[in-house]
Amino acid sequence: MLSDKLYGEGELPLNDYQGHRLAPECAEQFAKMQAAAAKDNIAIAICSSYRDFERQLGIWNAKASGQRPVLNHQSQPIAIDALSEAQLVDAILCWSALPGMSRHHWGTDLDLFDANTITREKLQLIASEYDPQGPCHKLNLWLKQYAADFGFYLPYQAGLSGVSPEPWHLSYFPLADQYLKAFDKKKLEAQLQKAPILLKTAILARLDELVAQYVYYVAPSPHGLNASTLTSDHQ
């Protein structure tokens, strides 16, 4: 069943593309979008794509244990020692998905930057890099105008999502919409129960709320498109 494979431990079909793993449809459409952007002197590059459950678990546990910084909505580090477990869960979820709840488990979602204006080594993936004075602002504007022509959109937008706005995070909605509909909280819960995840008690006590806020509460995607009907006047 599709719903068995959406939490980072399944076997969704993935292709290698420029060193990253993507769903085959997503890779095909991304290559077309990349070529179109290049004509406007924008070098769309991927800094993150598919992540399995174990990798997301490593990110989560590193933040929960203080080994990696936890950032607030302004991308500033916060002191976690004074937080309750429930507060720390919320603080981490500001920017990092709970293992099993990340759209990066699907092979449909990518974090992007403009390789013409910033290197991968200098990239921090913070909002200021995509603001008017940031190196990826031109990319940000281009994606808002043209990404949907290729089947992509921004799922994390101000006032439209539980996650903080992420102008670098693009989702291939013809597949991602299907995966979102197939998402099963009970299967996620079973996976978390057996995982060595920090803050487990606080997470499971609020799992219904967390799934509603951080999985289902995303910006609405364009509707009625699939890979066979996608066209672009900008190609």
Image (tube, grey):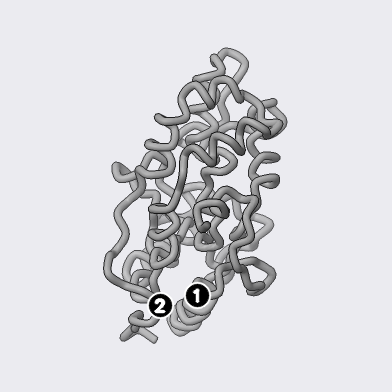
Q: Measured along the vertical axis of the image, is residue 124 above or below residue 27? A: above
Give the structural element (helix, strand or loop) at label 1. Answer: helix
In whole angstroms, how far apart are the C-alphas of marks 1 and 2? 7 Å
Choose between 51 and 114: the one closer to the eye.
51
Which residue is identified by label 2?
227
Q: Measured along the vertical axis of the image, is residue 41 above or below residue 147? A: below
Q: Which residue: 65% across, 46% down?
A: 53
How dense is the environment of label 1, judged by Cα within 10 Å: few (below 14), some, or many (20 and up)? many
- Amino acid of disc 2: Ala
Give the structural element (helix, strand or loop) at label 2. Answer: helix
- Amino acid of disc 1: Glu
Q: Position of residue 3 (x, y in %)?
A: 50, 52
Which residue is identified by label 1?
25
How dense is the environment of label 2, judged by Cα within 10 Å: few (below 14), some, or many (20 and up)? some
Horizontal side of 51 relative to 220 (left or right) equals right
- Position of the C terminus, as image quadrant, is bottom left
Q: Position of residue 126 (x, y in %)?
A: 51, 47
Horizontal side of 48 relative to 131 (left or right) equals right
First-in-chain label (1 vs 2): 1
Q: Which residue: 44% across, 32% down?
A: 210
Q: Which residue: 46% across, 24% down?
A: 206
Contact? badges 1 and 2 (CB < 8 Å): yes
Choose between 186 and 110: the one closer to the eye.
186
Q: Position of residue 232 (x, y in %)?
A: 34, 83
Choose between 9 and 2: the one closer to the eye.
2
Give the number of callouts.
2
